[in-house]
Image: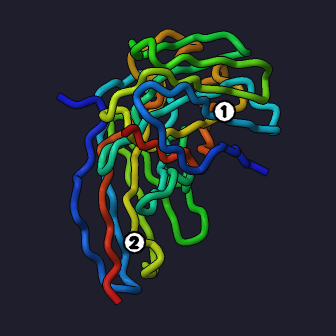
């Protein structure tokens, strides 16, 4: 079982619709969860971080965390063509001693917004 | 301001060359990271410096040599690389790697695109 799993896609969503990206992780001890957006040829850009169970909203983005089920998701409302990118889920605190956590990435989901 | 800068943006080097990648942040962050990313793959951790000390080395070959001269700077020295080392090299920083769940958010620089001929 991979430590952090994402559906690789590609995920195609019509412009204006809601895009839903999902991620599961293996270690119940994980503490911090991140979503990064990466355009082709560019570096990862932080979109959201979430530490507590529940929802966290920032503009058109909502991150959802359920530690009991070990999943984290990202919803993008009113999807725009500029949202087309690869979205990386990252989890901190997997399998490391305190103070030496490793940020573990999923393989990323390629999202395409169709005008 | 969450800016991490990296130089150069692009680097082409031969297998016998010695070169260095540089990374800088002025956010007062106490952890800095080197990642390697191949096309269509997630970033792969190479090294972590925590409070200017090397805390994680992910079994990286010795042809890659990291250096942290001070809390704002991180270098990656390259020597005798192989063509398969061609990749995007990313630097990142976080505020306090010990403060789990609070200030461990990592911010990435723009990367250096390395080509080894």
The answer to whether residue A69 shows anywhere in this view is no
Q: Residue at (41%, 62%) from the top-left corner? A: A40
Which residue lies under the disc numbered 1? B94
Q: Secondary structure at mark 2?
A: loop
Q: CA distance from mark 1 to mark 2?
A: 27 Å
Figure disc tally: 2
Q: Secondary structure at mark 1?
A: strand
Tell me the chain of label 2: A
Q: Relative to the observer, which residue lies in front, B65 or A112?
A: B65
Res B34 quadrant in image = top right
Q: How is the image coloured?
A: rainbow
Residue B35, x across and y down, in percent: 48, 33
> Quick check: B43 left or right of B20?
left
Residue B89, x across and y down, in percent: 49, 39
Q: Relative to the observer, which residue lies in front, B69 or A26?
A: B69
Which residue lies under the disc numbered 2? A84
Q: Residue furthest bottom?
A: A115
Residue A56, x across and y down, in percent: 55, 55
Tell me the chain of label 1: B
Tell me: residue A8, above or below residue B58.
below
User: From the image, which quarter does the C terminus of chain B lie in?
Assistant: top left
Circles 1 and 2 in contact, beta carbons < 8 Å: no
Q: Relative to the observer, which residue lies in front, A71 or A35?
A: A35
The answer to whether residue A68 shows anywhere in this view is yes
Disc 1 crowd, CA 10 A, few/some/many (<14, 14-19, 20+): many
Q: Residue at (49%, 9%) from the top-left corner? A: A97
């Amino acid at each position: 079982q991979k430590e952090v799993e994402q559906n690789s896609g590609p995920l195609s969503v019509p412009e204006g619709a809601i895009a839903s990206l999902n991620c599961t992780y293996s270690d119940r001890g994980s503490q911090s969860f991140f979503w990064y957006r990466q355009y082709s040829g560019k570096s990862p850009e932080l979109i959201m971080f979430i530490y507590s169970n529940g929802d966290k909203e920032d503009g058109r983005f909502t991150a959802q965390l359920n530690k009991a089920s070990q999943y984290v998701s990202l919803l993008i409302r009113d999807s725009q063509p500029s949202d087309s990118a690869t979205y990386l889920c990252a989890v901190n605190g997997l399998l490391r001693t305190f103070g030496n956590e490793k940020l573990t990435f999923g393989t990323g989901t390629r999202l395409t917004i169709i005008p | 301001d969450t800016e991490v800068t990296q130089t150069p943006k692009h680097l082409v080097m031969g297998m016998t060359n010695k070169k260095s990648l540089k990374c800088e942040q002025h956010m007062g962050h106490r952890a800095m990271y080197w990642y390697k990313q191949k096309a269509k793959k997630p970033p792969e951790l190479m090294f972590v410096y925590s409070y200017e000390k090397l805390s994680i080395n992910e079994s990286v070959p010795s042809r890659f040599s990291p250096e942290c001269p001070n809390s704002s700077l991180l270098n990656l020295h390259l020597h005798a690389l192989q063509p398969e080392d061609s990749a995007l090299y990313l630097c990142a920083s976080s505020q306090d790697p010990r403060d789990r769940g609070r200030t461990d958010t990592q911010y990435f620089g723009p990367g250096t695109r390395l080509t080894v001929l």
